[in-house]
Image (spheres, grey):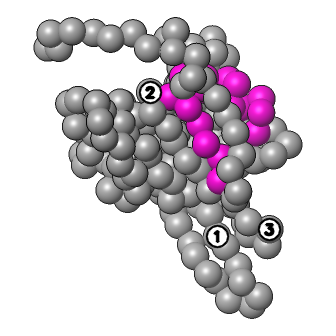
Amino acid sequence: RPGVLVDINRVAELDYLREEGDALAVGALARQRALERWSRSRFPLLAEALRHVGHAAIRTRGTVAGSLAHADPAAELPALFLALAGVAVAVSRGSRREIAARDFFLAPLTTALRPDELLAEVRLPRVPPGSGWSFLEVARRHGDFALVGVVAALSLGGERVESARVALFGC
């Protein structure tokens, strides 16, 4: 039980979506719906995954960073974060650290964030040209938690596979 609850909703500096080189930087207050709309032409894998997250009303209030910090094993965004080998930027008073996706989730509903840290930014690498991806989900109804889902990202370099990542959720 937390002794104090801090509401960051009015910290405008944390509400952003911006391209930085070959990655997308998502601020802690960037809403899922804003990212869904932004990514339609720029980042189709994100757009596809986000349309499965809850309902539009949920995506309008829910943040990308909040979903990752919650670390629900049935949620789409943590699986996407893992499949894309994203990076979480955690900040606390006087410190800042980057946490690779593979090190971020410790157990269901448990992350590597320390009690005094805020997940300030999420970085998602762009799927490079010549790559492929897939997102599939089975749920009772659209917007329900996944019964099972998979995110796959494959990067090709010429005729060979440079990297392949698969993340399962809800199973």
Q: What residue type is labelled 2?
A: Gly
**Residue 149 point in image, percent of width and height:** 52, 47
Q: Name the residue under label 3.
A: 129
Q: Which amino acid does label 1 sit on?
A: Leu
Characterize the local packing of mark 3: few (<14), some (14-19) or many (20 or more) Cα atoms within 10 angstroms: few
Locate residue 105 relative to residue 10 in the image: left or right: left
Boundaries of the magenta span: 23-39
Q: Mark 1 points at which residue?
A: 154
Characterize the local packing of mark 1: few (<14), some (14-19) or many (20 or more) Cα atoms within 10 angstroms: some
Sequence-earlier tag: 3 or 2: 2
**Residue 140 point in image, percent of width and height:** 54, 29
Tell me which residue sits at (44%, 27%) in the image: 66
Q: Which of marks 3 and 1 is in front?
A: 3
Tell me which residue sits at (61%, 42%) in the image: 25
Task: Relative to 132, say whether 59 is above or below.
Answer: above
Q: Name the residue under label 2.
A: 66
**Residue 136 point in image, percent of width and height:** 62, 48
